[in-house]
C-alpha cells in the first residue's frame, strides 16, 4: 500500500493519518496484551503502540523480536496522546525489520566516561547527546545569521600555516613536503589581511593547540569564530561582542527549548544574558580577587579558579579588559595612555565556564609592530606578509575569537567540553 514516509519531527501535522517511518527501536515494554516501542529516527522520538487483539500475529511477533537499536520501517496511524512528551503516539499496524541488533554495548544502565568515550560513535545516539549536537548546530547557524545580516563576509583562513599566531608553545607540527608546517592555532593574522580587503569579515573553522593541559575546558582540536573589523577600536569591538553573544543565546532560547529541557538546563540563567555586559579592568579584577583572599601579583595571568571567582559576581558574561602587555599576544595594541597594558578583553562566561572570547585592538603602527617582533623573537621572514598590512594603508582595526565548544558547554550547562563536539580530540584521545 502507498503510505508516505515521514520524519518523526513532522508527525504533529499528520494526526489521524497512516504513515511509514524509518527508525531505531530504543526500548520495548510489554504487558502481554500491549507492546510499547520507543522509536527514534534522529529527528525525534515517538512511542509505537501495538494491541495484540488489533494487529495481525506476524506484526505482533516481529515487535517482540526487536532489541535495542534494531532498525526497522514501521507503519501505523498517528494519534494525539496528551500524556506523551511530543503529544502524539503511533498505533502500529505493520513492521518491516531491517536488522535485529544484538548486544548493543550502551545499555540503559550507568557507564563510566572512558567507556562512553570509547563508544562515542554510538553514544551520539543518546537523547542527551542529540540535544547537545542540535544546540551546537543552532549556535553555528545563529553565528552566521548574526554576521551575515550585519554586512560581514565569511572568509576561510588556511589550516596549514608556516608560522604561529598565538605563541609557539602549543604548536601542532607537521611536514609540508620538505618544509615544516603547523596546524593553525587561530586564523586571526589572515583575517586581518581579509579585513583590509573586505572591511568586516568573519571566519568559522577548526583550530589546533597541542595543549598538554587535561582540563574540562581544553580540547586539542576546537572550532573558532573569528571576526575582524577595519576602522573599529577597542570599545566598539566590545559592543559587537556583547550584541553577538546576547543574540546567539537568544536564538538558542527561541529555537531549542525541547533540547534545553532534555539537558535540564536552568534557562532563567540564560534569559539574563542581555547586552550590555559589565566591564572590569585587569587591575580591578586583581583587587576583587585580593578582597576574596585570592591574592595574585600584578602581571600574572588568571587561571580557571580566578575566572570563576570573578564570574560569580555577575549574572551575565563579564569583560576583563586591559591585561598586562607582557602576558598577552605580540599583536595587541598598547593603551596609548598606559603602555604597560593592552587594549584587549577576555569575555568570561557566567556559572564558572571561563573564558569564551579573547579579543583586542591590533597594533596598527608599523614601527611598533616591528619592535614587537624583535621582543618576541619572531622570525621576520615568516611574517613579512603580515608587516605589509601595516605598510600599505594601515588602519585601526580590532577583532576577537569565540571558542565554540566552551560556548556550547556554557549554554548547554555541561561540566566538560568533551560532550560539545561530535568526536573530541583530547590529550590521550584520538579514537574513535
Ligand atoms: O584567547 P585565544 O587564544 O585568542 C585567539 O586565538 C585570538 N587570535 C582570537 C582573535 O582575536 N581572533 O582563543 C580564543 C578562544 C578562547 O577564548 C576560548 O574560548 C577558545 O578560543 N579556546 C579553546 N577552546 C577549547 N580548547 C582550547 N584548547 C582552547 N583554546 C582557546
Ligand atoms: Mg585567551
Image (spheres, rainbow, N blue to C red):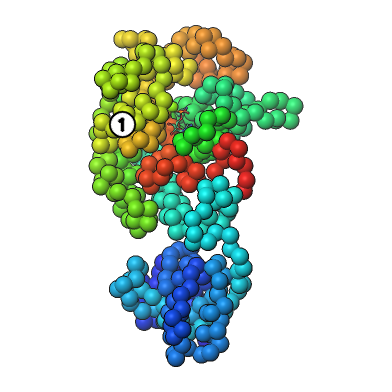
**In the drawing, does residue 289 fall left or right of residue 391?**
left
Image-quarter location of ligand 2: top left
Query: 312 and 334: which one is in front?
Result: 312
- In this orientation, does residue 15 appear? yes
- Residue at the spot 58% in from the left edge and 36% down from the top edge: 427
Q: Position of residue 352 (x, y in %)?
A: 35, 35
The residue beneath circle 1 is: 311
In this rendering, the answer to whether 288 lies above or below 40 is: above
Residue for point 44% across, 55% down: 128
What residue is shown at x 61% (from left), y 19% (from top)? 382
Label tally? 1
Instruction: Tell me where residue 312 appears, x and y as whole percent.
Output: 29, 33
Pick the residue in front: 212 or 411. Answer: 212
Q: Nearer the viewer, residue 415 or 71?
A: 415
Relative to residue 226, is residue 81 drawn left or right?
left
Decide if residue 207 is in sight here. Answer: no
The 10 Å Cα crowd at callout 1, few under 14, some 14 to 19, many 20 or more, is: many
Q: Residue at x 25, y 40 (%)?
A: 274
Q: Quick check: 107 left or right of 146?
A: right
User: Residue 360: which quarter of the image?
Assistant: top left
Which residue is the extreme one toward the right? 178
Q: Element under label 1?
A: helix
In the image, residue 101 sits, relative to residue 229, either above or below, namely below
| Residue 359 in picture, x, y percent from top left | 40, 27
Closer to the camera, 15 or 372? Answer: 15
Q: Position of residue 140 (x, y in %)?
A: 43, 46
In the image, the residue with mark 1 has its CB under 8 Å from the nearest atom of ligand 1 = no
Amino acid at each position: 500500500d502507498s503510505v508516505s514516509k515521514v520524519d518523526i519531527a513532522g508527525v504533529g501535522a499528520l494526526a489521524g493519518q497512516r504513515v511509514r517511518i524509518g527508525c531505531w527501536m530504543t526500548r520495548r515494554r510489554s504487558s502481554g496484551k500491549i507492546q510499547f516501542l520507543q522509536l527514534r529516527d534522529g529527528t525525534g522520538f515517538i512511542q509505537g503502540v501495538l494491541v495484540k487483539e488489533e494487529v495481525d500475529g506476524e506484526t505482533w511477533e516481529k515487535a517482540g523480536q526487536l532489541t535495542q537499536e534494531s532498525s526497522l520501517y514501521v507503519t501505523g496511524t498517528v494519534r494525539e496522546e496528551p500524556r506523551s512528551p511530543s503529544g502524539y503516539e503511533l498505533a502500529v499496524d505493520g513492521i518491516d525489520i531491517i536488522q535485529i541488533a544484538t548486544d548493543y554495548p550502551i545499555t540503559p544502565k550507568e557507564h563510566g566516561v572512558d567507556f562512553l568515550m570509547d563508544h562515542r560513535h554510538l553514544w551520539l545516539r543518546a537523547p542527551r547527546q542529540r540535544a547537545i549536537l542540535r544546540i551546537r548546530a543552532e549556535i553555528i547557524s545563529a553565528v552566521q545569521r548574526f554576521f551575515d545580516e550585519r554586512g560581514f563576509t565569511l572568509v576561510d583562513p588556511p589550516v596549514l600555516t608556516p608560522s604561529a599566531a598565538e605563541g609557539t608553545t602549543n604548536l601542532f607540527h607537521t611536514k609540508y613536503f620538505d618544509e615544516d608546517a603547523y596546524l593553525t592555532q587561530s586564523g586571526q593574522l589572515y583575517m586581518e589581511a581579509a579585513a583590509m580587503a573586505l572591511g568586516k569579515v568573519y571566519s568559522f573553522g577548526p583550530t589546533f593547540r597541542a595543549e598538554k593541559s587535561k582540563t574540562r575546558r581544553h580540547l586539542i582540536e576546537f572550532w573558532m569564530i573569528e571576526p575582524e573589523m577595519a576602522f573599529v577600536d577597542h570599545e566598539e569591538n566590545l559592543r559587537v561582542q556583547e550584541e553577538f553573544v546576547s543574540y546567539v543565546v537568544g536564538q538558542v532560547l527561541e529555537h531549542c527549548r525541547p533540547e534545553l529541557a532534555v539537558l535540564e538546563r536552568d534557562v532563567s540563567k540564560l534569559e539574563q544574558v542581555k547586552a550590555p555586559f559589565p566591564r572590569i579592568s585587569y587591575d580591578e579584577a586583581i583587587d576583587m580577587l585580593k578582597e576574596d583572599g585570592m591574592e595574585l601579583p600584578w602581571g600574572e595571568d588568571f587561571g580557571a579558579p580566578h575566572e570563576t571567582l570573578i564570574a560569580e559576581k555577575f549574572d551575565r558574561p563579564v569583560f576583563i579588559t586591559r591585561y598586562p602587555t607582557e602576558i598577552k599576544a605580540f599583536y595587541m595594541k598598547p593603551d596609548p595612555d598606559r603602555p604597560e597594558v593592552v587594549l584587549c578583553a577576555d569575555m568570561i562566561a557566567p556559572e564558572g565556564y571561563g573564558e569564551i572570547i579573547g579579543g583586542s585592538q591590533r597594533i596598527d603602527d608599523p614601527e611598533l609592530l616591528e619592535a614587537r617582533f624583535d621582543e618576541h623573537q619572531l622570525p621576520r621572514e615568516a611574517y613579512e606578509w603580515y608587516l605589509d598590512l601595516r605598510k600599505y594603508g594601515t588602519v585601526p582595526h580590532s577583532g576577537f575569537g569565540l571558542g565554540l565548544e566552551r560556548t556550547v558547554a556554557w549554554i548547554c550547562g555541561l561540566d566538560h567540553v568533551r560532550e560539545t563536539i561530535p568526536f573530541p580530540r583530547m590529550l590521550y584521545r584520538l579514537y574513535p
